[in-house]
Amino acid sequence: MPKMRAAIFVEPGRIVLDEKPIPNIGPLDALVRISTTTICGTDIHILKGEYPVAPGLTIGHEPVGIIEKLGSAVQGYREGQRVIAGAITPSGYSEACLCGCHSQDGAGTKHGWKAMGGWKFGNTIDGCQAEYLRVPDAMANLAPVPDGLTDEQVLMCPDILSTGFSGAESGRIRIGDTVAVFAQGPIGLCATAGAKLMGATTIIAVESLPERIDMSRRMGADHVIDFTKADPVEEIRRLTDGRGVDVSIEALGRQQTFEAALRVLRPGGTLSSLGVYSGDLRIPLDGFLAGLGDYTIRTTLCPGGKERMRRLISAIASGRVDTRPLVTHRFKLDQIEEAYDLFSHQRDGVLKVAIAP
């Protein structure tokens, strides 16, 4: 059986490069030869054992590649076509999809609800940190990449651009809004870009790392508050003349930032939560105005599917957003363990890495 190289989860603390069989595909699937992929913060949670996956699983959920083989029932695509697939791969025909909530495809089961919904790559099926990837329900998930765009231009679309933009979309930002974005990691930076694209005219970012502060301004932040030097709640209140922000986006997943994002809202404002929380969240009575503040709290799982990918590619192709600066380091697949070491320890100003088999 033909073999390929893949980044395989062995046990907490160990993701290694090894060989495994090239995936077989079914009638509705596609086999994609990976040309570029990356490492996500969620992969680090897997590495550390903070999010459980099965030993032997190939990790990764952000693929750019070329169709190697199509299932017998797949129509509208051709072998040799360059494509991306979202980190979330909805079937298109589940109850969640038919209700318009494609991200939660597969979430409801007779055994309860899964927090990660339609996230399959590197979670419930083999992922894309490998030479080849099986894409399920290919006609619902493969989005062609225009010839004029490079791999690195569309590399953020499958996950962090989709997630970050969804933070702005879930906040229902309007032209003229003031928006605060807590944390300027890759997803927070994309949320900043999304807020600008949706019409926010004042964007306040909260971050402490110098390279991320610089990048947040590049992605659209008008003000950046270093939380190690000033209280972000007080500073945001000062910058808004005490009014508060229309929308706050929490992109870190910690109690402290969630509370701060709540406390800076104007009455009737919206907290858009993108963080993945590892423990129970507490809502402070005063920050919540005892339930009388007309607040909206929205949570979002990265939207997937080919139409979502098409729209994100269109945003890239139009020049309205450029995520190439987020790629700070490049590795070959043979160097995947080195890439994990760098990314997991956040050394050398890393934001995102590009990995090319």
Image (cartoon, rainbow, N blue to C red):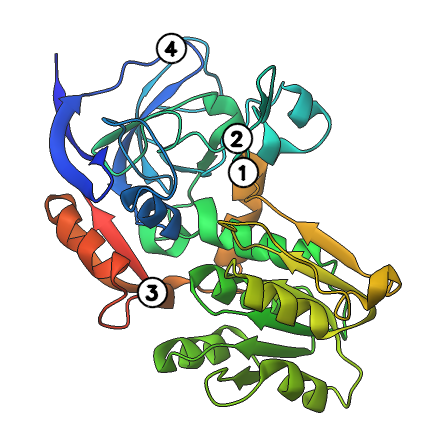
Q: Quadrant of the C terminus?
A: top left
The CA span between labels 4 and 1 is 21 Å
**Residue 258 is drawn in which quadrant?**
bottom right
Residue 176 image point, x, y percent = 77, 75
The CA span between labels 1 and 3 is 22 Å
Give the amino acid at mark 4. Gly
Of discs 2 and 1, which sits in the foreground?
2
Of discs 2 and 4, which sits in the foreground?
2
The CA span between labels 3 and 2 is 25 Å
Q: Residues within 10 Å of mark 3 (few under 14, many from 20)?
A: many
Tags 2 and 1 touching, CB below 8 Å = yes
| Label tally | 4
Tags 3 and 2 touching, CB below 8 Å = no
**Residue 237 is drawn in which quadrant?**
bottom right
The CA span between labels 4 and 3 is 36 Å
Residue 306, compared with residue 186, is above or below; it is above
Give the amino acid at mark 3. Leu
Give the amino acid at mark 2. Gly
Q: Earlier in the sequence, mark 2 or mark 4?
A: 4
Of discs 1 and 3, which sits in the foreground?
3
> Regarding mark 3 in the picture, which secondary structure is present there?
loop
Residue drawn at the location 22% of the way across and 35% of the way down: 11
Q: Quadrant of the N terminus?
A: top left
Q: Earlier in the sequence, mark 3 or mark 2?
A: 2
Tags 2 and 4 touching, CB below 8 Å = no
Q: Earlier in the sequence, mark 4 or mark 3?
A: 4
In the picture of the structure, the residue carrying the numbered disc 2 is 118
Residue 7, compared with residue 226, is above or below; it is above
Q: Earlier in the sequence, mark 1 or mark 3?
A: 1
Q: Earlier in the sequence, mark 2 or mark 1?
A: 2
In the picture of the structure, the residue carrying the numbered disc 4 is 26
Give the amino acid at mark 1. Gly
